[in-house]
Amino acid sequence: MKSEKELNSLRNEIERYLLKAGDYGADEKFDLACEAYKQAIQLGKGSLPDEEMAGPIHNYGFLLYQMGATDEAESRYKEVKEIYEALIDQDAETFLPELLNITHDLGDLYMEMGYPDKALEIYTREIELYNRLQIVHSADMADTLEKMAKLHHDKQETEQSIKLMRDALNIREQLREDNPMIFNGLAAQSRYTLAYYLGKNEEYQEAEDLFKEALSNFKNIISQGQKAYITLVASAMHHLGNIHRNIRNYESALEEYGKAMEIYRQLSIDNPTEGNLYIAAVLQSTAQLNKLTGDTEKAKKNYEEAIDCYTKAGEEAPGAFDNEIAGLEKEINELTGN
């Protein structure tokens, strides 16, 4: 067993390696940074308490994540999480926040790796930790709830996605009251996302109301100089059009599609690829409405224009939109009886 003097000497040596790792990382010399972290961790393991080594291991895992070595990063993150899980009963005040941080990072890593079930399990644990810490209005908590909502939506678990998105919106609304400059946009986007999920669940009245509120919010934010929200304005109009189409309010649907199309055509001047993709989506929605009203000629025309948009968008990435084009061609063939 090492004496206190020997342990302090060891801590100083580890600190030198950690400083080297930080410097190498800042200079983007990631391989050298990894080696420095490995040396520090190897020196400390078995000699220093786990709680002293958890931080360096966490930082090493984050570096691996940045480098794209996700499997190795997962191993490091899980190791750190196990350390803090074992320590929280001894000193919750010190170690619960650390456990919260590593749990959040592990959930994000699983999202990045494409493991939705693992991500949901870890994010659920993260929300439990927020509640245990009595943190109820955290921006990070809202972010995690939104990620969970998306994961449930992707799994077609609509009720769960709606509940979680409501919780995220409620938190951001509370935060907006104290700091509108930062949270106005995030609250509006939460309202937009919740409206989208409700629409998918055929809860059309509430979805329509929320889309209209989000539109008003976006326009107000744009009036203050934040022009980036113009795309969300057009998208909300497009979704409103879909809702009106689904409730057979076809005239209003066409009006919303037209307003969305006008914005997207303006956007396509500066960004033709992205603009063409947005325009193609609205044209498809319009064509579907044309089919419902029996106007096959207009439907065919809109499908053909959508194909043209996908073709133009694919000029920089040949073959990228072949599936979309094939689907539209199939729609045209069904319309014309070919």
Image (cartoon, rainbow, N blue to C red):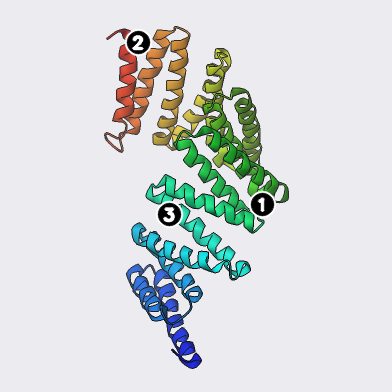
Q: Nearer the viewer, mark 1 or mark 2?
A: 1
Label 2 Cα crowd, 10 Å radius (few <14 / some 14-19 / many 20+): some
Labels 1 and 2: the sequence-earlier one: 1
Question: Looking at the rendering, in which quadrant would you find the N terminus?
Answer: bottom left
Q: Residues within 10 Å of mark 1 (few under 14, many from 20)?
A: some
Residue 243 image position (x, y, % from top left): 55, 22
Q: Amino acid at mark 1?
A: Val
Residue 71, position in %: x, y? 34, 58
- Which secondary structure lies at badge 1? loop
Above or below, 216 relative to 292: below
Q: Residue at x 57, y 51 (%)?
A: 127
Give the secondary structure at mark 3: helix
- Which image quarter: residue 252? top right
Residue 225 shows up from this direction: no
User: Is 307 or 112 nearer to us in this picture?
Assistant: 112
- Looking at numbered disc 2 in the image, what kind of residue is underneath it? Leu
Q: Nearer the viewer, residue 134 or 272?
A: 134
Q: CA distance from mark 1 to mark 3?
A: 24 Å
Residue at the disc numbered 3: 109
Residue 237 in the image: state x and y as whole percent: 56, 27
On the image, numbered disc 2 is attached to which residue? 335
Provide the residue designation for mark 1. Answer: 136
Residue located 57% across and 29% down the image: 198
Q: Nearer the viewer, residue 90 or 170?
A: 90
The answer for how far apart the CA atoms under marks 2 and 3 are is 46 Å
Q: Residue at x 38, y 67 (%)?
A: 28
- Going by the image, does 323 lie left or right of 176? left
